[in-house]
Amino acid sequence: MTNLLTPGRVYVIHLGVLLLLSLSLLDAQSVQRHPTASRKVGKDSISLCTRATEQIMKNGVWRDSVVKTWKFDDQHMLLSYLESDWIDGSLIPLNRYMNSTVAGLLVEQVGESWKRSQSTWQKEWKETFLYDSAGNCYESVYFNWDGTDYVPISQLVSSYTSGGRLAKIVSGEWSQNQLQNSRSTQYIYGSQGELLERRYFKWSDTRWVPDAISKFTYDREGREIEHDDSTSRELFSYSSDTRDIESIRQHFSFGKWTNEIKDITHLDADGNITEITVQAFSSPPPAWRNSQLRWKYEYQKVAVRVPLVLIARASSNKTEEFRLSHNFPNPFNATTQIQFTVPQQAQVTLKIYDILGRQVAVLVNETKEAGTYTIRWNAQNAASGAYFYQMASGGFVQTGKMALIK
């Protein structure tokens, strides 16, 4: 799921189909792409992003503006989110949402806004989630508060591939107590599990009509380098130590691509996002110019106890030839990539487990030829918290830790 923040409301999209038309707006506000998970910083610890501060340059000095905070339970699952703003020297709450989980799965999210004149929280919306036996969210319903009760507004239904990857999302809107088709998205993957295309459709009378398409390109290390939506695109570049990431958004007009916004993301040695700064492209003369806006991030290091089901040692004397690399990016929001190496043809499994040791997804379960592979895990339907990814092949078993915050 991805959090889209708009004035007065926080929408939670495990499936943002209702907001597909707003994807360009999301891209234009990438400064709000807060780290939503943490990096493993030790054998048994992770760091959770607990605070993000928007700072605005005034008279040559950076001053705090909007503050976003996240709180977690003892299983490192997200409990609540709060957005506040500095007004007249005081930090005033704006909106918040609270999560309810059952057995490690997000089942309900409730959003409220702060009524300053009344000094009270007011209900705004809620979203409920249903899961299949594999832990995949197959349905969510969004409600608005009408002053006396929650009224259904929209519904999203998801289907998955046999490997647990998101295959299709269909959205519907409630009108006069009837649910009507609205939009649909299909996901196309490559041989390594990487997302290649998102195909968008809209409902017209009695059938689905193609509407738009997004295409994704990756480098040899499996990192995304381009996201193309035909009329807009985003280009990514990485420093040699991957401590700095640049993303440039462009739009296509008058037969050429034109620069708009550049985000520069800085990571610490553990892979945690520490700062995002923004540059705007303007002319004349054409050049990137620093904006008056940036985000700073704070983390909390917490201990993680690895479930017994995941504790395993490699018994093969060829263990060193197999390799499971750190997932990237980490922190990540909704999707992350896991790379592994196989020295010779072998049966390989790559599975995801939650903090309690329950299997969440099977990313790989097949024979692989010798080589290095990159697999993408789409966790948009998983609840925030700590997760483990485990590679197994013959006597080789290796486990890594990651976390997801939404």
Image (cartoon, rainbow, N blue to C red):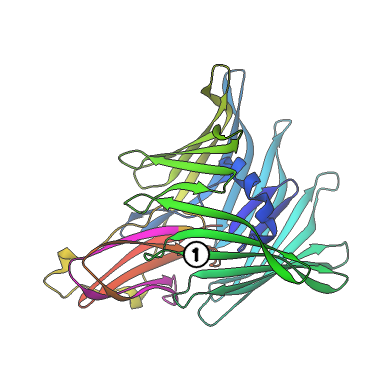
Residue 88's place in the image compared with 302, above or below, is above
Q: Is residue 361 left or right of residue 338?
A: right
Q: Give the residue at x 29% y 58%.
A: 325
Give percent across and percent down for residue 380: 54, 63
On whether residue 175 falls in the magenta region, the answer is no
Residue 171's place in the image compared with 248, above or below, is below
Q: Give the residue at x 69% y 39%.
A: 85
Majority secondary structure of magenta residues: strand
Q: Give the residue at x 46% y 60%.
A: 195
From the viewer's side, name the closer residue of 136 and 126: 136
Q: Is residue 330 left or right of residue 258?
A: left
From the viewer's side, name the closer residue of 336 and 24: 24
- Figure quadrant of residue 214: bottom right
* Residue that lies at the very extreme toward the front in this rendered image: 255
Give percent across and percent down for residue 2: 59, 56
Residue 230's place in the image compared with 71, above or below, is above
The span picked out in magenta is 336-365
On whether residue 344 falls in the magenta region, the answer is yes
From the viewer's side, name the closer residue of 57 and 319: 319
Does residue 331 show up? no
- Figure quadrant of residue 369: bottom left
Element class at badge 1: strand
Give percent across and percent down for residue 247: 48, 39
Residue beneath disc 1: 188
Give percent across and percent down for residue 309: 34, 78
Q: Is residue 237 left or right of residue 70?
A: left
Amino acid carrying label 1: it is Ile
Of the 4 image quadrants, the one containing the C terminus is bottom right
- Figure quadrant of residue 61: top right
* Residue that lies at the very extreme toward the left in this rendered image: 317
Does residue 284 show up? yes
Of the 4 image quadrants, the one containing the N terminus is bottom right
